């Protein structure tokens, strides 16, 4: 296996992760944001590996620019995907309490 195949596989994994995250993101669920964040981290890792394999200042600056832009956007919308707190269930009225109020 050559390096290009490994990078292509990583891009495929990132694309699948983004596709999986699409519906939960539309529903504004936190697990969709988590999947998108993991895809973002994988993309950063791929950019670093690519820059190390093929050292180029231009590619490095592109990776840094995209990383900062996408990271800012992803972290900016995070509050919209905060987990919803579920209220504690109300205690049920017992027979003794009911009789007390009803007479």
Image (spheres, rainbow, N blue to C red):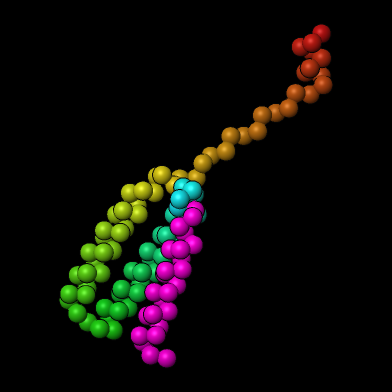
Residue 8, image x, y percentages = 39, 80
Asked whether, in this view, residue 50 is left or right of residue 102, the answer is left
Q: Nearer the viewer, residue 66 or 99?
A: 66
Report the magenta residues as a range: 1-24
> Which quadrant of the figure contains the N terminus?
bottom left
Can residue 40 be seen at all in this image of the molecule? yes
Q: Nearer the viewer, residue 94 or 59?
A: 59
Residue 82, image x, y percentages = 45, 45
- At x 22%, y 82%, the residue is 55
> Which quadrant of the figure contains the C terminus?
top right
Image-quadrant location for residue 91: top right
Asked whether, in this view, residue 17 is left or right of residue 57, the answer is right
- At x 58%, y 34%, the residue is 87
Residue 88, image x, y percentages = 62, 34
Image-quadrant location for residue 40: bottom left
Which residue occupies the extreme top position in the image? 103
Q: Relative to residue 38, is residue 86 depicted above or below?
A: above
Residue 49, image x, y percentages = 32, 78
- At x 35%, y 54%, the residue is 74
Asked whether, in this view, residue 85 is left or right of residue 63, the answer is right
- At x 38%, y 90%, the residue is 2
Residue 84 belongs to magenta span? no
Identify the main secondary structure in magenta. Answer: helix
Can residue 30 be seen at all in this image of the molecule? no
Q: Nearer the viewer, residue 96 or 10?
A: 10
């Amino acid at each position: 296996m050559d390096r290009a195949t490994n990078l292509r596989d990583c891009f495929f994994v990132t694309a699948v992760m983004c596709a999986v995250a699409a519906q939960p993101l539309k529903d504004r669920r936190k697990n969709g944001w988590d999947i998108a964040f993991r895809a973002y981290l994988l993309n950063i890792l791929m950019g670093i590996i690519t820059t190390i394999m093929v050292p180029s200042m231009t590619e490095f600056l592109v990776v840094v620019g995209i990383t900062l832009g996408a990271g800012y956007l992803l972290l900016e919308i995070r509050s919209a995907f905060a987990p919803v707190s579920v209220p504690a269930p109300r205690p049920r009225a017992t027979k003794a309490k009911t009789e007390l109020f009803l007479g």
